[in-house]
Image (cartoon, helix red, strand yellow):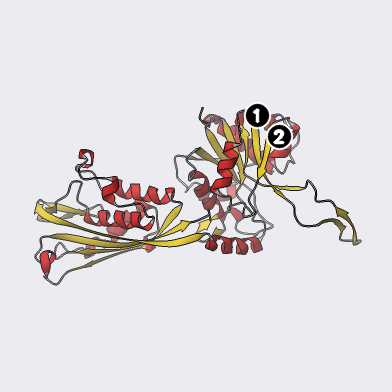
Amino acid sequence: MAKKITVIILSAGSGKRFDKIKPKQLFSIGDETLLDINIRKFLNIKNINNLVIVHSKEISAEVKKLGNENIFLTLGGKTRQESVKNGLNYAKKLKPDIVMIHDCARPFVDEELIKNLIANTSFSSGSVPVLKVNDSLRHINLKTSESKKISREHIFQIQTPQSFPFKKILKAHNKSTKNNYTDDSSLAEENNIKMKFILGDKNNIKITDKNDIKFGRVMFNNQKEISVGTGFDVHGFETGKHIIICGIKIPFTKKLKGHSDADVAFHTIVDAILGSVRAGDIGDHFPPSDKKWKDAPSSTFIKFAKNMVKKKNGKIKSIDLTIICEEPKIFKYKIKMKKNLSKLLEINEERINVKATTTEKLGFLGRGEGIAAQAIVTSEIFTKDG
């Protein structure tokens, strides 16, 4: 029986120790906030059905911009434990079998650890990641300089996410009279919820202060690669009243031939995107021999390519598109094209460049027999969950 899984991401802390103005969860590593990174990580796991973001009033405006049918929002409490309880009670409407509880301050959790936790969680027992303490330990009174050695045998650090059977951990939180648990495994233990401890990940560090952010940025940059894909497409003209380029209808005395809507620019961008993540070409996924793509809007292909990048654990970083034709004149439509691409691909317009040129009357393009387009797309691929 498949487990229905909800992830609760705790993002309600004020983080005053970290920064007096901006909450920690909104600080960026690369061009993503800690919250963005966590969301991307969990939504990339196909077994996970939805996320509940537990947030503070101070960042309500920011989290409301997230806009995803699999993301739900609820306010946190005064303590971590209250925030978890609020998230669990909100999650009742989602009817999960398993719930994973994760601190937003750990953006470097990787896919393997998440999958291991899911595999080791049942309808009756939970799973918690731990790391053995290898450093020497001492109990020190800084005021008196008195100290004593502490044995590190059987001493482990506890990480998140922690995974539990939903009904059991919900019941434990709702009946608890304490409000000072700093992690859910402690509460689970006191309520006799069985747990399996599995090996955590040393890279799954907790961002506590700004030095951690600096270290995190080094880790982030070491865990990604830049990949480039190219695309080229040509469509001839036939009798018609308009052409469609980048989803924009342009009045003209002809139209472009094609099985779909013949959007030559979208087609070349799709090929370039797929090339950047080594995922074949548009014909592999949408063969012209398949009748269901007859007259299909090419925005369908663009959205598919965008999702393919996400599946490959990547992000589109830049697009450079060149449209080659004598007519119609493209210049006045370039801004609309960029805006449409930005909306469909969910990337900033500043990362998109649209150019137009001619072949100086040479060749079939110069004779006005059709339109060509070429594109270069740069994607960033996270090789070990950055």
What is the x, y in percent for residue 353?
32, 64
381 relative to 130, above or below: below
Q: Please indicate, yes or no, whether residue 54 appears anywhere in the rendered image.
A: no
Disc on the earlier residue, 1 or 2: 1
What is the x, y in percent for residue 275?
34, 57
What is the x, y in percent for residue 383?
50, 56
Query: Disc 1 versus disc 2: distance between alpha carbons?
Result: 8 Å
- Rendered image quadrant of residue 20: bottom right
320 relative to 7, above or below: below
Residue in the picture at 57% in, 38% down: 118
Q: Tell me the tag on residue 181.
A: none
Q: In the image, is 85 to the left or to the right of 281?
A: right
Q: Please indicate, yes or no, whether residue 45 appears anywhere in the rendered image.
A: yes
Q: In the image, is 193 to the left or to the right of 292?
A: right
Instruction: State the residue in front, 255 or 153.
Output: 153
Type of amino acid at the residue the image marks with label 1:
Lys
User: Residue placed farthest to the bottom in the image?
Assistant: 360
Residue in the picture at 32% in, 58% down: 272
Could you tell me if the residues under marks 1 and 2 are in contact, i.e. CB atoms within 8 Å? Answer: yes
- Rendered image quadrant of residue 286: top left
What is the x, y in percent for residue 80?
68, 43
- What residue sits right under mark 2 in the picture? 188
Residue in the picture at 15% in, 61% down: 328
Q: In the image, is 86 to the left or to the right of 95?
A: right
SS for dot 1: helix
Instruction: State the residue in front, 366 or 334.
Output: 366
SS for dot 2: helix
**Label 2: how many residues lie within 10 Å, few (<14), some (14-19) or many (20+)?**
many
**Label 1: how many residues lie within 10 Å, few (<14), some (14-19) or many (20+)?**
many
Type of amino acid at the residue the image marks with label 2:
Ala
- What residue sits right under mark 1 in the picture? 168
Instruction: State the residue in front, 128 or 338.
Output: 128
